[in-house]
Image (tube, rainbow, N blue to C red):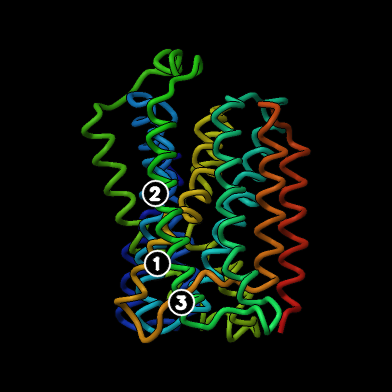
Amino acid sequence: MKILYALLIMVPITLVLRFAGIGGHTAVFVASAFALVPLAALLGRATEEVAIYTGPKIGALLNATLGNSAELIITIIALREGLVEVVKASIAGSIIGNILVVLGLSLLLGGLKNGTQRFDAKAAGTNATMMLLAVAALTVPAVFALGSEEHRPSATDIEHLSDGVAIVLIVIYGLYLLFTLRSTTPEEEEWSHHGESTMKLPLAIGLLLGSTLAVVVMSETLVGALEPTAASWGLTELFVGILLVPFVGNIAEHLVAVQVAYKNQMDLSLGIAVGSGLQIAVFVAPVLVLISLFVGPEPMTLVFSSFELVALVAAAFIAVLISVDGESNWLEGAELIGLYTILGIAFYFVP
């Protein structure tokens, strides 16, 4: 672990490379990726410490919220620059990545180390059902926009439809938080005996906030260098937006979920992986739709491409199937990663 924390030296090195213009965008990309690894370790340590005091639900919610704050900031900047399609691809990619990559790696590595792992099926089922509801809601504007010409609403009507869906999703997310945070499971009642804290709660929260702020800066640097790097490698804008930007932008959050799954803390791991994707679908995406009315040259709608919709629906359904029995194994993780690989190959060939 000391060797891992030694990589924190990459944080100032990345900033020097970025602002001094040394080495070009590829050097900044590589350095910021290495810098996120020890920051993810710190974020994971802080998340575990906070969760000991608060329980896995609030701990996972804090981690997902702070982790998604980086993406929210980055996408608002992209909206201001008029990169609406990249933002929508990034939203779809984040949801897919959290369900297939983060959850897949968590189940795979956790299962290989601990065998069959168990989690609260009720909480996981609630999250998965909400995810399916969110994906269904996100498909509605696209279905109307892609319908037959005689029944297709105007562009203005599609914008108004997206605004209405966004408001409803935000309200549902508020009700979801109220329901989940007020309900208590036997697993949470026993959580106080799960481990002993090595730091006081204010220090743990401070570490969580500080490491999240550093992750925001490094993520913004990484994503800023990613697009020119990917372009020099011949990758399309859709591939970059739906696969690379969400993956590297949330790499710290990915590592935290895998880290706690490896320690057999599956409620916390699933709360981070599925909860983060859920938050993007029912809160971040709707908020961006409403913010786009005031920021940027054009408003953003919830009309995703047919490629993105297929990937979203497939990911949501498989999340439901995995969550219903309250058990997981390494094979389920391998299956999730396999599906993500298939989607990656498909998006690579989309012009």
Q: What element carries label 1?
A: helix
**Which comes sooner in the sequence, label 1 or label 2?**
2
Q: How far apart are marks 2 and 3 (CA)?
A: 36 Å
- Residue sitting at 52 percent across and 69 percent down? 302
Kind of residue at badge 2: Val
From the viewer's perspective, is residue 216 above or below residue 30?
above
From the viewer's perspective, is residue 165 above or below residue 171?
below
Residue 250 location (% of width, % of height): 48, 57
Please give the residue where the numbered disc 2 appears in the rendered image: 171
Compared across the picture, whether 136 is left or right of 201 comes to right
Quadrant the N terminus occupies: top left
Q: Which residue lies furthest to the left in this view?
A: 202
Label 2 crowd bin: few (<14), some (14–19), many (20+), radius 10 Å:
few
Q: Nearer the viewer, residue 166 or 222?
A: 166
Kindly report which numbered mark, 2 or 3, lies closer to the viewer in this rendering.
2
Please give the residue where the numbered disc 3 appears in the rendered image: 225
Quadrant the C terminus occupies: bottom right
Please give the residue where the numbered disc 1 appears in the rendered image: 288
Label 1 crowd bin: few (<14), some (14–19), many (20+), radius 10 Å:
many
Kind of residue at badge 1: Leu
